[in-house]
Image (tube, helix red, strand yellow):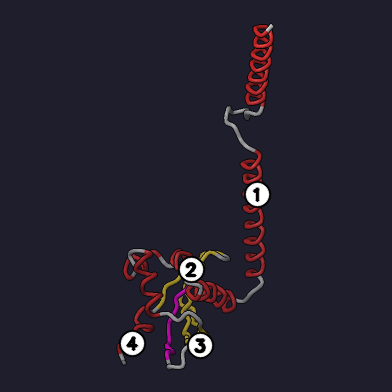
């Protein structure tokens, strides 16, 4: 009697293990890799996020198409300044012209160090003048540190090259931010 019960329990356990194995095989993807529900949700979210980012980029391009040259160049400059204020130096570094990076900031870390040392966290920017020289634009700016009571203002030239709408590269007068510290 005990042997018969033990045999029935073992048979039930084997059947359950067999069902679990079948269930596991049934949930495998077509390419043989298993994907959990969470992985599928994350994949869908990433695709939706990518589509949303593309939609935003397209919307920005359309807005830029309707702007004058000066407003577009000021927009590009303000994007750069906002990245610097937020200390998003990685994003700002990507905006820089390749030759400019090579000459002044060989690494992103060198650029980050410069920004932390010389560029204010909160600024007020005044656009004094803009000139077009061939396919580049040169902006003359006044940058003010709005959080400091000390006069930490400086003038800066920013050079912008627009390759296409919302596709640009820039450089700036590196020494102008440092001059206020040399004069002291």
Q: Viewer-proximal residue, 76 or 89? A: 89
Which residues are the magenta region? Answer: 152-161
Task: Report if the CB atoms under discs 2 and 4 are less than 8 Å apart.
Answer: no
Q: Position of residue 145 (x, y in %)?
A: 47, 86
Cα separation between marks 2 and 4:
23 Å
Q: Earlier in the sequence, mark 2 or mark 1?
A: 1
Task: Give the CA distance from mark 2 to mark 1.
Answer: 25 Å
Image coords of residue 166 (percent x, y): 56, 66
Disc 1: which residue: 45
Q: Which residue is mark 3?
A: 146
Circles 2 and 3: CB atoms closer than 8 Å: no
Q: Residue at x 48, y 85 (%)?
A: 141
Answer left or right for 110 relative to 127.
Answer: left
Q: Choose between 38 and 68: the one closer to the eye.
A: 38
Query: Which of the 4 image quadrants contains residue 36?
Result: top right
Determine whether 168 is above or below 77 in the image. Answer: above
Q: Which residue is mark 4?
A: 181
Whichever of labels 1 and 4 marks the residue nearer the N terminus, that label is 1
- Position of 157 with respect to 56 (left or right) is left
Q: Which badge, 2 or 3, comes first in the chain's sequence?
A: 2
Residue 178 in which image quadrant: bottom left
Q: Which residue is mark 2?
A: 88
Secondary structure under tag 1 reads helix
């Amino acid at each position: 009697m005990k042997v018969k019960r033990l045999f029935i329990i073992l048979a039930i356990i084997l059947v359950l293990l067999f069902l679990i194995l079948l269930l596991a095989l049934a949930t495998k993807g077509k390419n043989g890799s298993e994907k959990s529900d969470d992985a599928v949700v994350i994949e869908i979210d990433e695709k939706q996020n990518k589509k949303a980012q593309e939609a935003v980029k397209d919307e920005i391009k359309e807005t830029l198409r309707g702007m004058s040259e000066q407003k577009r160049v000021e927009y590009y400059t303000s994007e750069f300044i906002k990245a610097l204020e937020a200390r998003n130096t990685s994003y700002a570094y990507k905006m820089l012209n390749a030759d400019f990076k090579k000459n002044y900031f060989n690494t992103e870390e060198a650029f980050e160090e410069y920004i932390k040392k010389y560029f204010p966290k909160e600024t007020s920017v005044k656009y004094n003048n803009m000139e077009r020289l061939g396919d580049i634009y040169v902006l003359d700016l006044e940058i003010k540190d709005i959080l400091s009571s000390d006069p930490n203002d400086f003038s800066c030239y920013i050079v912008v090259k627009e390759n296409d709408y919302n596709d640009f590269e820039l450089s700036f007068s590196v020494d102008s931010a440092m001059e206020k510290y040399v004069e002291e």
